[in-house]
Amino acid sequence: MYIDHMSERRALFRPQMTVADLWPHLREVVAPDVLPGQVWDELEPLLPAIPGPVVGFERGLMGPELTEVGYPLPRWRRSEALEVAGRHPASAHLSPLVRAWCEAPGLDELCDAQFHTWDVGPDGVGSPCVFLMTRGRQWRAMVRAYADHLRARPDVPIGPASAHAVADALFQAEATTRVEGIWAVGVYLGRPGCPVRLSASVADRPWPDHPAWAQVDEVLAVAQTDPQLATVAFGPGPDPGEVWHVPVRFYRSPRPGEAARPLLEELSSRGLAAHAQAQALAGVDVTRMLPLSSATLDGIPAVTALWWSLERIKVVVGPEGWRSAKADMLARVIWRTLEGRALIDDR
């Protein structure tokens, strides 16, 4: 079977779907020990702020409480994102960032995608965060293009931050960071100074003498993950900080939950995951057919399904050992033709 991920090619599929279309099905397929039942009512007002039919959830490993919700934004959804930003306050921060992506010279090619999230806590949905994705080794040009565009225009709000504050944070990160091979730049819009976090390939071995590498290598060994396919996240500047994030991805596995089981069991043995929660997350892999009678993929009749799966486990490490971990899950749509072609709408 040929599987075509949205990140590789823009196929034409009908009907256009949104996260709101998936919500009734998610209510039914997601177990309450994976996400609490009240999540669906609490987040429902946010649904009009999410363009497209892909949504991600982050939670801790000691209990099912939600800590973050978000979605990927590929270039072909930018017009839709700008429409959403104009009518929903929770997405107002999108407008300057997406317009920069559309208008800044060269940025359309330099930036592969954006990823937008909101913190979620006891008081509900909180501050947004944006991740800027680039392909190849063009992160410096991408960051400068965003920063130049934002700095040259009025200092409008971007969430709790401002356009000029975001530009300053990007300029500072690029000017003070010596390593290359960065593929994602995260900007935490709701925190003082708009702190930045950089993601790089493990294969490039940035900061090769950093003491956190022993823990990074141990996490990847336990997870049975090829270092050539893994990433690590750290702070910008001349000192990347002692706290590093190791996001171990499982979504390309045929059974993501099962693939994550060795890492979940190790986290449980170290007291970083409740045993029952680790067992529940290992079972996050559900496919449900969607009742669409006229679905097509590139004009060919297709069937559609909701895929609810474990996306990754993010382990936080320091020189002294493993510190904590969180799980990310993703809901997306699979389009499948009778000829055996399948497209996964993961972007």
Image: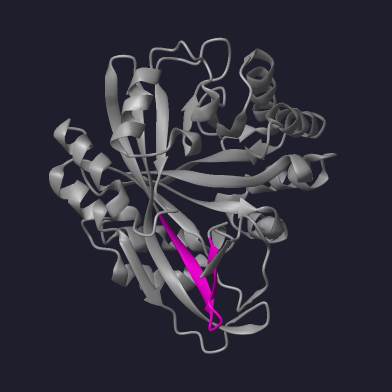
- x, y percent for residue 142: 73, 33
Q: Which residue lies furthest to the bottom in this view?
A: 293
User: How many callouts does the rendering have?
Assistant: 0
| Figure check: 215 above or below 288 | above
The residue located at (14%, 49%) in the rendering is 276
| Residue 101 screen position, x and y as percent | 74, 44
Question: Residue at position x 37%, y 58% from top?
Answer: 309
Q: Name the quadrant containing residue 312.
A: top left
Is 246 situated left or right of 162 in this image? Answer: left
State the colouring used for the structure image: one colour
Residue 193, horizontal then vertical, whole percent: 56, 22
x%, y% of residue 89? 58, 52
Q: Who is closer to the viewer here, 34 or 121? A: 34
* 27 is within the stretch colored magenta: no
Is 46 drawn above or below residue 300 in the view shown?
Answer: above
- Is residue 332 shown in magenta? yes
Left-right relation of 53 to 11: left
| Residue plotted at (67% across, 21% down) | 174
Q: Residues in magenta?
A: 330-345
Please give the name of the residue rendered at 32% of the width and 39% of the height, measured from the top-left corner. Answer: 223
Tell which residue pokes out farthest to the right in this image. 105
Viewer-proximal residue among 298 and 165: 298
Foreground residue, 2 or 116? 2
Q: Is the magenta stretch mostly helix, strand or loop?
A: strand
Please, is residue 287 above or below residue 42 in the view?
below
In the displayed structure, 324 sits above or below 54; it is above
Of residue 103 and residue 209, the one placed in the foreground of this image is: 209
Quadrant housing the C terminus: bottom right
